[in-house]
Image (cartoon, grey):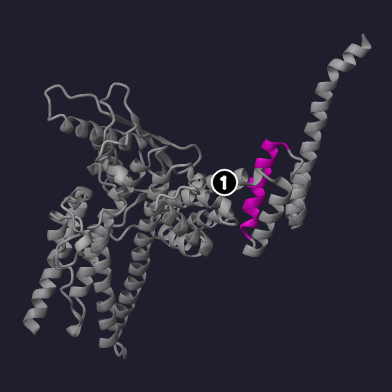
Amino acid sequence: GNQETDLAGSPNEFSEHQDLVNKILQVYIIHLMDTEQHDLIPVYAAHLRDTSLDLTYMIFLDEMMKYSLIEQQKCYSLACRYLGESVPRLVCKYAAKTMQEGRGSIEDGAEHRANACLWLCYEETMYHSALTHTLALCRDFALGGRKCYEAASTLLLQVLPDNFWKWLAALKFEASHADVNRMDMYENDTRDFLSAAQELEDWRDWYDFQDALRKWKGLHQVMVQQQVKPGSPSVSSPTRAESIQSTGEKLIDHALRLLTRQWLQMPEDAAADGHFPIPPAVVRLTCQPVHKPAGQEGIGFTAAEPAGTFNPEALESALQRELLAASSASTGGQHQPPPPTYVARVAGLVETDRVEISVQKAETGAPSSLEALEQVAYAVGWAIKGNLSQDLQDIGLNVQHLDCGESQTMCRMICRQVCLSKLVLQCIYVRHVLSSLPGGAASKKGHNLVETVVETRAGGDTATATPDSVVSTKLRLTQYLTPFQCQELVLMEREATINELDNSDKE
């Protein structure tokens, strides 16, 4: 009888023993972190259970972000030696965790989220994960404020190594020449890889413009400050004004090129030939309500002041009304309004100043379609820009993470809704500045911008477009502008035109 009891009890005793060893290892590994004995950590971590290993290494990888690239790469190499196949799972999990959870304010944590992508860039076998993760970050940062844009530039220019861009170019070449020998690195899907590669190129182009605009705006502000200082030697510096004029004209050309070339729109997004199914999209948006500074609809707000009294129910009601109105309009305004294709929910996240917006297919709604996805993007975009209702016109949403599940098309549509409207108003801002430059540096560049926005074709007008970029599809840029943004566009165009008339009189 005693023998049977011992035999029956041994599994529990073994389990308790393993639990104790596991806890001791975890405590010792934390001690190794505190004493900076990083080389020993993977040696001991190799004996942890998977759940404990994941938890411990999330802490360790975060700790290593404080150290140099050399130390980080050494840490990665040792992990590969002792942890083997667990390494890809660990670094992907850490990068995703950092992107989705963040720390502190969304703006202040942006650079940390960008730098966390480094763990996916130390060997070529991880580059496909780095590509997917970078696209997600580029989308998130585009829906944030100034620091998010700066973090995106850091990600694209500094974090991603040269070897990553060479790998991407080589695979693009092979895929475009029907050589799929290496397509196994991207889920055996050549079309998805080419779309991802093209989207990343589009984001590089977008952030190049944003970076150049920030620097140009800073130079212009310096010139204005020097002009108002009495006795300043740079009050009438023609060289500086001409430099600002020249760079500003290039910025307008760059912006018009982005506006008129179907930026961030992949072939499958149009579903033109019917080969691409339109599965129902599920949108989840983690964001922080912020006060919008007046007069910054287009330049972008810095999201420095959280909206402490924000009511999630007001946003949910506004989203529901917009989705219902869009669904009714698509059916020709029937007497009996149809149920919405998509429904929205907004909930505050516990112990944070963030909210989660979810939009998903309604059980009784019409089948999902490209038009339905556009309606969702339209409503979510207006919510981000703070223009869904009169009650919410002073509140914008600073986005931490956008997740549309498997629907890459939905992600791109939401980003286009927000980014193209911002681009239009950034362009008119540059035009306004150019028209007000002192002396003979004033420029009429962009005088046809409003006409381009109201009715344009991909490739722009024949004066600015290249022959191979002109197609017959209208872009309908006005669909991206909210009423407040339209008002800002018209007012700035009016002031620019008055400046041009004043300059003509002086001549």
Task: Assess disc 1: are there few (<14), some (14-19) or many (≥20) residues with their C-alpha within 10 Å of its C-alpha.
Answer: some
- The answer to whether one can see residue 456 in this image is yes
Q: Residue furthest top?
A: 1
Q: Is residue 351 above or below residue 109?
A: above
Quadrant into which the N terminus falls? top right
Q: Quadrant of residue 434?
A: bottom left
Residue at 21% over, 54% down: 485
Q: Is residue 54 magenta?
A: yes
- The answer to whether one can see residue 55 in this image is no
Q: Is residue 366 above or below residue 33?
A: above
Q: Would residue 499 be found to the left or right of residue 407 on screen?
A: left
Residue at 26% over, 78% down: 246
Q: Would residue 462 be found to the left or right of residue 187 on screen?
A: left
Q: Is residue 351 magenta?
A: no
What secondary structure characterizes most of the magenta part?
A: helix
Q: How many numbered discs, if any?
A: 1
Numbered range of the magenta stretch: 49-66
In the rendered structure, which amino acid carries the disc numbered 1?
Cys
Q: Residue furthest left?
A: 505
Residue at 17% over, 50% down: 473
Q: Would residue 104 be found to the left or right of residue 247 on screen?
A: right
Question: Residue 91: x, y in percent?
Answer: 60, 48
Question: Residue 119: x, y in percent?
Answer: 59, 54
Question: Residue 402: x, y in percent?
Answer: 41, 44
Residue located beneath label 1 in the image: 92
Quadrant into which the C terminus falls? bottom left
Q: Nearer the viewer, residue 55 or 130?
A: 130
